[in-house]
Image: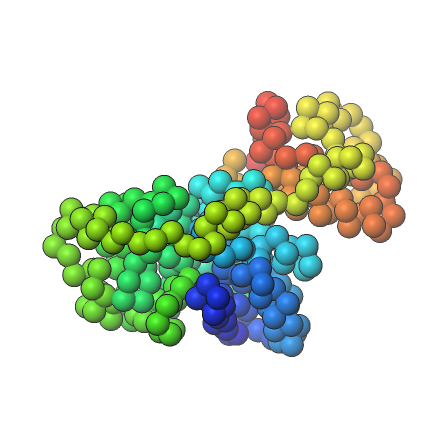
């Protein structure tokens, strides 16, 4: 397995690159915008193909690298279903798997630091975002943070993992790189509480200043989506309502770009091709690539299957 922990010293963010083998698919967790060149260089040096970029939650202290990585590598952008970002390609919920070739991470919904915080479990290690830090926990005083929910996420989900599970957080401010569940249960000062009320009290008394980047990072990170409007202006999009009527006609092929797991939550010739996916993001990329390749009769469903559903479109399983 290939596993790299990268550090952004400006925001003290850890970013992780994971792949099952040289020459195979890779995923990246919590990339920082300013470091995107370095990630791409590393991925190339290791002969990897970056296929997914994931954020554990909406970050307030740095600009996410999700959009830039998507634009430069055509990777799929991934966040949890509770995220309020405009568009990411794929949204995961608790119990789902985050998969690439040879690697499957279990998705845990671990709110508290924010209401869109997720952790990702990969056998002997867990990526905890800002839910559980090394000898600390993520603050809970903004972005719909909730100390009570965080207590539940930590004590009833993360601390139930085997003691030797390694903790890889999204940040560390003291140079620590890794801990384990057993170690932090014993030595994390925030976890030495007798009750949820005591934890809430502890968190409410922290009185931390807001992150310097917060006013810039939060609104910017909300808008990581590909500009589907540009695709629409070029005439390569059909509305969900148009797609509905097109679907009934002969000579139309709808191409589903979703993964099997996404499909379960809810068949080219000279025919006209209409791409669709979950939110219109991947299909916008697909139609761009198809148009670049000279397939002039291609389009995509603006807003994806999400918009299709809202327009009353039927779902076949
Ligand atoms: Fe955070």
Asked which quadrant contains residue 272, the reply is: top right
Asked which quadrant contains residue 124, the reply is: bottom left
109 up-or-down from 65: above or below: above
- For this view, does 192 lie left or right of residue 222? left
11 up-or-down from 223: above or below: below
Asked whether 140 or 306 is in front, the reply is 140
Q: Residue at x 37, y 68 (%)?
A: 173
Asked whether 235 or 201 is in front, the reply is 201
- Return the residue found at the far left: 194
Q: Residue at x 52, y 49 (%)?
A: 216
- For this view, does 246 lie left or right of residue 297? left
| Image coloring type | rainbow
Q: Residue at x 53, y 61 (%)?
A: 31
Does any portion of residue 261 appear in the rendered image? Answer: no
Residue 133, percent across and down?
A: 33, 63
Residue 28, percent across and down?
A: 54, 62
Does any portion of residue 312 appear in the rendered image? Answer: yes
Residue 248, percent across and down?
A: 73, 24
* Quadrant location, the C terminus: top right
Q: Residue at x 87, y 48 (%)?
A: 294
């Amino acid at each position: 397995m290939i596993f790299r922990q990268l550090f952004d010293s400006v925001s003290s963010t850890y970013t992780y690159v994971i792949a099952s083998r040289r020459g195979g698919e890779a995923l990246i967790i919590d990339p920082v915008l300013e470091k995107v060149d370095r990630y791409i260089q590393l991925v190339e040096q290791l002969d990897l193909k970056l296929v997914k970029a994931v954020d554990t939650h909406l970050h307030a202290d740095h600009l996410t690298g999700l959009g830039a990585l998507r634009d430069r590598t055509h990777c799929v952008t991934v966040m949890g279903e509770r995220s309020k970002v405009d568009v990411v390609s794929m949204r995961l919920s608790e119990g789902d798997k985050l998969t690439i070739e040879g690697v499957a991470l279990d998705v845990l919904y671990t709110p508290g630091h924010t209401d869109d915080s997720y952790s990702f479990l990969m056998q002997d290690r867990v990526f905890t975002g800002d839910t559980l830090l090394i000898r600390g926990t993520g603050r809970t005083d903004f972005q719909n943070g909730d100390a009570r929910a965080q207590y539940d996420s930590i004590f009833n989900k993360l601390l139930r993992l085997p003691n030797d599970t390694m903790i890889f957080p999204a940040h560390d401010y003291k140079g620590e790189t890794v801990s384990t569940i057993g170690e932090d249960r014993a030595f994390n000062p925030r976890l030495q509480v007798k009750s949820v009320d005591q934890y809430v009290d502890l968190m409410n008394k922290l009185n931390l200043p807001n992150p310097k980047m917060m006013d810039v990072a939060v609104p910017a990170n909300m808008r990581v989506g590909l500009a589907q409007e540009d695709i629409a202006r070029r005439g390569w999009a059909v509305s969900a309502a148009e797609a509905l009527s097109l679907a009934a006609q002969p000579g139309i092929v709808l191409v589903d770009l979703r993964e099997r797991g996404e499909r379960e939550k809810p068949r080219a010739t000279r025919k006209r091709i209409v791409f669709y996916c979950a939110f219109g993001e991947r299909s916008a990329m697909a139609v761009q690539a198809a148009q670049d390749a000279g397939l002039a009769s291609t389009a995509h469903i603006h807003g994806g299957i999400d918009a299709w559903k809202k327009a009353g479109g039927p779902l076949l399983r």
